[in-house]
Image: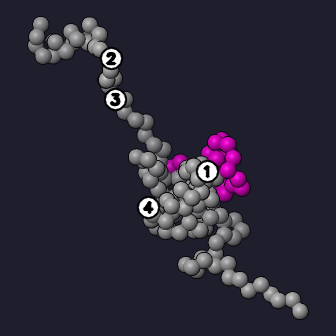
C-alpha cells in the first residue's frame, strides 16, 4: 500500500507559498537585483516596510504576480515599481530590469557645490571678496 504524502504546503498565514504564475516576494526582489542577497530581501519583507498593492507585507513567502505594485525603501529613496514578469533566475542587470517598471525613479541628486580639500582659485577668492565688500 502506498502512503499518500499529507504535507500541507500552506504557510502560517494561510496563503499558498507560490503557485502557477506566482513567485515568493524575497526571490523576486533578489532576481530583480534590488538587494544583494535573498536573506536581505527576506529581512526587508519581515521588517514591515514593504507594501504589495497597498497591503503591508510581513512574510518573505508572500506570493507576487505580474501587475502587483511594490513600495519599499531603498537607501534614501522610496521605490514604487510594478512587476512585469516573474523571472526564473538572478541574471544580468538588463535581464533584471525587464522584470519591472519603475513608477517613481529616484530623482537625480542635486549637485553639491565643490568643497573640501582644494584651494579656491583667484577668481573664486575675488568673487568672495566682492560679496563681503572687501575690495
In magenta, the rendered stretch is 85-103
Residue at image coords 44%, 47%: 75
Task: Give the quarter of the figure containing the N terminus.
Answer: bottom right
- Residue at horizontal 87 percent and vertical 89 percent from the top: 2
Earlier-in-chain disc, 3 versus 2:
3
Residue 68 visible at all: no
Q: Is residue 35 magenta?
A: no
Q: Which mark is residue 112?
A: 3
Q: Quadrant of residue 23?
A: bottom right
At which x and y percent is residue 85? 66, 55
Q: Residues within 10 Å of mark 2 (few under 14, many from 20)?
A: few
Q: Nearer the viewer, mark 1 or mark 2?
A: 2
Residue at which label 1 appears: 32
Q: Which residue is mark 2?
A: 118
> Closer to the N terminus: mark 4 or mark 1?
1
Is label 1 in contact with label 2 (beta carbons under 8 Å)? Answer: no
Which x, y percent locates residue 29?
Answer: 58, 55
Judging from the image, what secondary structure is the residue with disc 1 in?
Answer: loop
Q: Residue at x 56, y 66 (%)?
A: 60
Residue 88 showing in the rendered view? yes
Q: Which residue is mark 4?
A: 49
| Real-space Cα separation, disc 3 to disc 2, in angstroms | 15 Å
Pinpoint residue 123: horizontal percent, then vertical percent: 27, 8
Residue 34, given in percent of the width and then of the height, sits at: 55, 50
Amino acid at each position: 500500500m502506498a502512503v499518500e504524502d499529507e504535507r500541507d504546503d500552506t504557510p502560517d498565514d494561510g496563503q499558498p507559498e507560490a503557485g502557477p504564475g506566482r513567485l515568493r516576494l524575497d526571490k523576486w526582489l533578489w532576481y530583480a537585483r534590488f538587494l544583494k542577497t535573498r536573506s536581505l530581501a527576506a529581512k526587508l519583507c519581515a521588517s514591515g516596510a514593504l507594501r504589495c498593492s497597498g497591503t503591508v507585507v510581513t512574510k518573505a513567502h508572500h506570493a507576487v504576480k505580474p501587475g502587483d505594485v511594490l513600495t519599499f525603501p531603498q537607501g534614501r529613496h522610496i521605490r514604487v515599481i510594478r512587476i512585469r514578469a516573474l523571472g526564473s533566475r538572478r541574471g544580468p542587470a538588463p535581464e533584471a530590469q525587464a522584470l519591472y517598471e519603475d513608477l517613481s525613479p529616484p530623482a537625480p541628486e542635486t549637485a553639491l557645490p565643490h568643497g573640501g580639500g582644494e584651494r579656491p582659485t583667484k577668481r573664486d577668492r575675488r568673487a568672495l571678496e566682492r560679496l563681503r565688500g572687501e575690495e
